[in-house]
Amino acid sequence: RATLPAPFERVFELLSSPALFPQWLAGCQSVEPPTALRRGSRIRVGFGTRAAEFEIVELTPPNNFGWIERRGRPGNHTYFNLGFGGGSTNLTMKSVWEARGWWARLFGELSRRKDAKRFFEGVVNNLRRIVTS
């Protein structure tokens, strides 16, 4: 959980606009198509030499946004919940990973917590930088 010094409508716009993903999503260099999203939309997110495909599974403006990775790290779910905090936004993020096979389950148990924490901290730091500049 984190607090961002911006109205939650602005934070939701940053999170749910594909063209803005490279500004806050660590390692993201491109998003195709960079058009408006709806539930069920699929977007290709480029991370240098590798790419992922996200399917939007939650899109309830201005509070909830989430995706599941279909390619890249299949089964990885990421959800954002935004709440009113005066002139600020309370951001809660949840990452759920469905292991595909015993090797993936073992690797996930060893690395999941550290990666989720690093991902969350990166997103929060990037969003704070954007809304305060």
Image: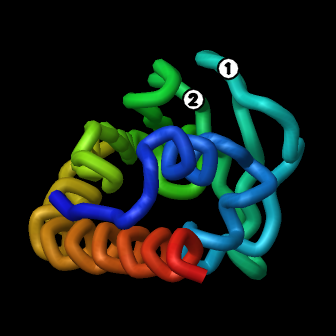
Q: Which residue is mark 2?
A: 56
Residue at position x 44%, y 35% in the image:
66
Q: Is residue 84 left or right of residue 128?
A: left
Q: Residue furthest front?
A: 87
Three-letter code, disc 1: Arg
Q: Say if 101 sits above or below 51 in the image.
A: above
Is 51 in front, or is 99? 51
Q: Are marks 2 and 1 in contact (CB under 8 Å)?
A: yes
Is 18 placed above or below 24 here? above
Q: Report the front residue among 121 and 113.
A: 121
Which residue is under mark 1? 38
Q: Is residue 64 left or right of residue 25?
A: left
Comparing 26 with 7, the one in front is: 7
Q: Residues within 10 Å of mark 1 (few under 14, many from 20)?
A: some
In the rendered image, is residue 64 in sight? yes
Residue at coordinates 79% horizontally, 31% vertically from top-left?
36
Q: Quadrant where the C terminus lies?
A: bottom right
Specify whether 22 is left or right of 12: right
SS assignment at label 2: strand
Q: Residue 93, which numbered label?
A: none
Task: Identify the mark nearer the N-term, 2 or 1.
Answer: 1
The residue that appears at 27% across and 38% down in the rendered structure is 83
The answer to whether residue 93 is visible is: no
Please give the count of numbered marks on the rendered protein: 2
Amino acid type at mark 2? Ile
